[in-house]
Amino acid sequence: MANEIKSLSPTAVWSFFYDLTQIPRPTGQTKASEDYVMALGQRLGLETERDAVGNVIIRKPATPGMESRPIVTLQAHLDMVPQANSATKHDFTTDPIDAYIDGEWVRARGTTLGADNGIGAAYAMAVLAADDIKHGPIEALFTIDEEVGMVGANGLQPGFSRGNILINLDSEDECELFIGCAGGMDVEASLEYKDEQPVPEGDVAVRISLTGLKGGHSGMDIILGRANANKLMNRFLKDAVQSCGARVASFEGGSLRNAIPREAFAVVTIPADEADGLWELASDYQEIFTTEFAGVEDAISLQLEQTELPATVVPEEIQDGVLNAIEGCVNGPMSMLRDFPEIVESSTNMARVSLGAGRFVAYFLVRSSLESRKYAVASSIESIMLLCGASVRFDGSYNGWAPNAKSPILSTMTKAYEEVLGITPKVTVIHAGLECGIIQGVMPDMDMISVGPTIRSPHSPDERVNIATVERTWQVLRRALELV
C-alpha cells in the first residue's frame, strides 16, 4: 500500500504524507514527527530550529534574483485527532495508520486518517525539498498540538518566525480561500458525590449502547445537523427513568472536545418486571431517532443487553439533576454570520459526558467568530450546570481571525487559481479554530490566508482526502509562491 500511495501525483507530497501516517502522532505525542521534520531540514542543509514548546521552523533561501521578495511562511500542525470505530483495535500511541486508496480518495481503515493536517505538513515539506519552484525566502512552520488547546501556536514567541506572509495549509475545501476563522473556549462542568447508593432490591442491570453515528469535526460539520450521541443517550435515559423506574449506574459518551460524539454507553438497573418495557422503549427510540435524522444519519443503532449488576447506582437527586442539565444544555449552531449567511457564527459541541463512580463531568467546546457571543453561549451552559450543583470552569480561550478582504496574499492566491485552474475561488471564513488567529496575536502585521485540498469528515474514522484536489492545490500553491 505504501508504494500505491507514494506513487500518486504529486509524488513528493504523497510520499511525505504517507511517512507521517506511519509515525504515531496523536495530540500530545508529536516528538517523533517533530524529529522527522527536523531531520528533513538538516538533510536538506537548511536552517532548522525547534523552540521550547516543540514547534519546528525550517528556512529555505530564495531562488537567486528573488531575495528581495517577502518572506512566505507555510504553516501546518503535526498532530492528528485519534478516533477509531469501536470495532477497530488501534493504539494511536504506537500503531501506524492503515491508509489506503479508495477510488478518488485516500482514507484509513477504521480510524482517522490524519490528512488533517498531515497533507498540509506534506505540502510544506515538498516545497522545502523541491528544486524546480521559483520563490522568494520560504519558512515552513510546523506547530504542535493544535487539536487540543492550540498549544504550539499559543507557545510561539516573537521572532521565531520572520515571515511577512502566512499561508496556513489547514483548510479543507479546494477552490475556497479562507480569510477568517472562529475563536473558541472550553467549558468543563464537574460534580463530586458519594458513591454509596446500593442497587435497588430486585433490579436487573442493562447495558445500553448507542453507536453508528457519523460524528465529525465540531466546527465545520456542526452545520450538517448530525446527531450528538450524548444528547440522544441522555434523552433515552431520562425517559427510561421516568417510564421504567430505571436507575443510572454509569453514562459515558464522546471523547475529544473537537469531535462530534459518535457513540455513548450506559448501564442502568430496572425492576425485573420492567425489563420488557425498557426493550420496548428502546425500540420506540430507535424508530424516533431514525426518523428524526433521516437523510443525515443512516446507521444509528440503539442496543440493549442484560449485564452484571453494578456495585452502586447514582443517587437519585444527582441522577435527575444531571439528566435534566444535559437535556437543557444548548448544542449545535447558535447563530449565523451576517456577511457569510451560510457560515455558522457561534456553536457549541457537548463533546464528552461521564457519570458514575462518584463523579460527573461534561466537556463542551464553544466556538464563535464574535467574542461576546462566545461568552454568552458559555454562560448559558454554565447557568444550566450550576442548577444541578456542578461547578463550571472556562479554559483555553483563543481569539478568532479577523477577515481582511484587501489582503495582498488573497489577491495573489486568487490570481494563482485563475491562472492554473481557470476559476475564481470562493472567498469565505470558516467556523473552526485555525491557528491564524493566535499567530496574528504574536505577529499582528502578518498577511494571512488559509488553503487546502478537499478533506471530508475530519476528526472521524470516515476522514478522507480527495486525490485529484491534492494535485490541483499543489499546482496552485507552486504558482502562488512564484507570484508573491
Image (cartoon, rainbow, N blue to C red):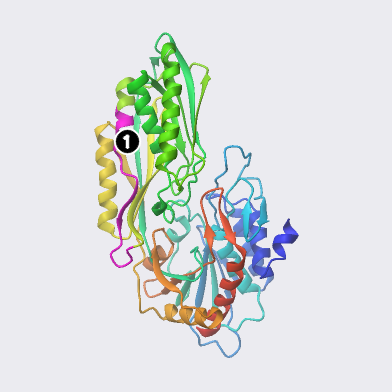
Against 124, residue 456 (above or below) is above
Instruction: Give the x, y percent position of residue 393.
Output: 32, 42
Instruction: Give the x, y percent position of residue 434.
Output: 43, 61
Residue 162 in view here = yes
Within 10 Å of disc 1 (Cα), the crowding (few <14, some 14-19, many 20+) is some
Q: Magenta segment: does it hold 460?
A: no
* Residue shown at 48% from the left, 56% from the top: 146
Instruction: Give the x, y percent position of residue 388.
Output: 27, 31
* Residue shown at 67% from the left, 59% from the top: 19
Instruction: Give the x, y percent position of residue 31.
Output: 59, 54
* Residue shown at 49% from the left, 78% from the top: 423
Q: Residue furthest bottom?
A: 65
Residue 54 in view here = no
Q: Nearer the viewer, residue 251 or 468?
A: 468
Q: Amino acid at mark 1?
A: Glu
Identify the element where label 1 is drawn. Answer: helix
* Residue shown at 43% from the left, 81% from the top: 411
Q: Where, by quadrant of the figure, is residue 363 drawn? A: top left
Which quarter shows the N terminus?
bottom right
Range shown magenta = 321-341
Q: Magenta segment: does it hold 340?
A: yes
Q: Residue furthest right?
A: 3
Q: Residue furthest top?
A: 201
Q: Which residue is mark 1?
A: 327
Left or right for 333, reference 296: left
Q: Nearer the viewer, residue 47 or 332?
A: 332
Against 419, residue 119 (above or below) is above
Left or right for 212, reference 270: right
Q: Nearer the viewer, residue 154 or 255?
A: 255
